[in-house]
Amino acid sequence: MAESINTNMVPKYKLATGEEIPCIGMGTFGSDRFTPEQVSRAVAGAIRCGYRMFDCAAIYENEALIGEVFHRAFAEGVVRREELFITSKVWNNMHGQGDVLLSCAKTLRDLRLNYIDAFFVHWPFPNYHAPGCDADSRNPDSKPFSIDRFMATWRQMERLHDMGLARNLGMSNMTIPKLEAVLPLCRIKPTVMEIELHPCFQQQALFDYLMEQGIRPIGFCPVGSPTRPERDRTPDDIADTQVAEVMEIAKTHRVHPAVVCIKWAVQRGQIPIPFSVYQNEYVSNLKSTITDPLSDVEMALLKTADRNCRLIKGQVFLWPGAGDWHDLWDEEGTITK
Ligand SMILES: NC(=O)c1ccc[n+]([C@@H]2O[C@H](COP(=O)([O-])OP(=O)(O)OC[C@H]3O[C@@H](n4cnc5c(N)ncnc54)[C@H](OP(=O)(O)O)[C@@H]3O)[C@@H](O)[C@H]2O)c1
């Protein structure tokens, strides 16, 4: 029997909409490595252990099986719908007129829900790659970011909110220059923002900007995504679980370095969404939010673990004529065209 954690003890935040969101969720991207069966089994186990937030997406190609798990958990009285915070995302090939609504409808059907707690624009451009592609794969139809195109997509997101189908709206993989351009144009502002955040990639300026705007950051790859697909690996990547600062603190607390990454994320204020199909791992991740916090000195030490090491570089989304992956991230402070 799995260890179950008292969910009432897991801290929550209030979003700008007034809705509550747990301080930790579970990721569901199988990284082309774990099957939908493995991932959905982990979701079922995680609900029983006390997880109340799940980060889904159409492109993870497992929403139908995860939907069965939710359906069964509600039917068996393991949890009530209103106790879960479930997110999903529109994939890059569904940004066109009417497509965002279709995408949300399919996700709701697959997840067997009648509303989603937060719906995200997964990437801020309509550039997509085939599932399981390699790092050199490029789509000749890819385009640079355009404010007009993004806002046309966002208007559809706003309609989903109007219709009560999406209770919160979110963006993902954004930068400060892009946000400065689009936030003033939003009739309904995002309340959550999913971005890459882990000790070796802290994005302090973007984190501060979001907090100032009242937008809660959700941190993906919180453990440094050791099982990420091959296309997302380069020789210069640094493993968060192997940097001295993280390892030293893990030794003091007698936990796996991954758990230190989660504690750091929660105490900093972003919502980590660690993935694991292993019960001992996902239980330790949830438990880490309610036991044995890091000290101020340890938090200060972890601040120095930042290596500005982006793992999900997004090179497969580059458009013809673009330079390298840095062009996706507006590093010069203006939107790269
Ligand atoms: N919005 C976006 O564009 C975007 C992009 C990427 C990811 N995401 C979301 O973020 C979620 C998390 O990211 P991710 O899956 O790439 O990376 P991650 O959560 O940082 O890493 C997952 C891996 O970390 C290891 N791990 C997790 N907990 C552990 C523990 N307690 N002890 C030891 N090892 C542990 C597991 O590896 P082992 O199996 O080797 O133990 C697991 O496969 C995804 O599932 C997805 O929902 C969103």
Image: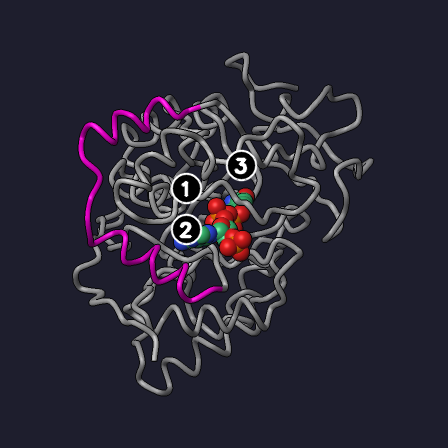
Q: Residues within 10 Å of mark 1 (few under 14, many from 20)?
A: many
- 44 to 264, vertically: above or below: below
Q: Position of residue 292 (x, y in %)?
A: 19, 48
Residue under label 3, please give it. Answer: 151
- 93 to 307, vertically: above or below: below
Residue under label 1, please give it. Answer: 219
Label 1 residue SS: strand
- Whichever of labels 1 and 3 marks the residue nearer the N terminus, that label is 3
| Magenta residue check for 236 | no
**From where the camera sits, is residue 188 visible?**
no
Label 2 residue SS: loop
Q: Nearer the viewer, residue 219 or 281?
A: 281
The quadrant the C terminus occupies is: top right
The quadrant the N terminus occupies is: bottom left
Asked whether mark 2 and ligand 1 are closer than 8 Å, the reply comes as yes
Q: Nearer the viewer, residue 170 or 279?
A: 279
Q: CA distance from mark 1 to mark 2?
A: 6 Å
| Magenta residue check for 282 | yes
Which mark is on residue 273?
A: 2
User: Which amino acid lies under the numbered mark 1 shown in the image of this protein?
Assistant: Gly
Q: Residues within 10 Å of mark 2 (few under 14, many from 20)?
A: many
* Left or right: residue 29 compared with residue 186: right
**In this figure, which colouring scheme has been used for the structure?**
one colour
User: Which amino acid lies under the numbered mark 3 shown in the image of this protein?
Assistant: Met
The residue under the point 65% across, 47% down is: 229
- Whichever of labels 3 and 2 marks the residue nearer the N terminus, that label is 3
Residue 328, picture quadrant:
top right
The residue under the point 61% across, 32% down is: 313
Q: Nearer the viewer, mark 1 or mark 3?
A: 1
- Whichever of labels 1 and 2 marks the residue nearer the N terminus, that label is 1
State yes or no: discs 1 and 2 in contact (Cβ < 8 Å): yes
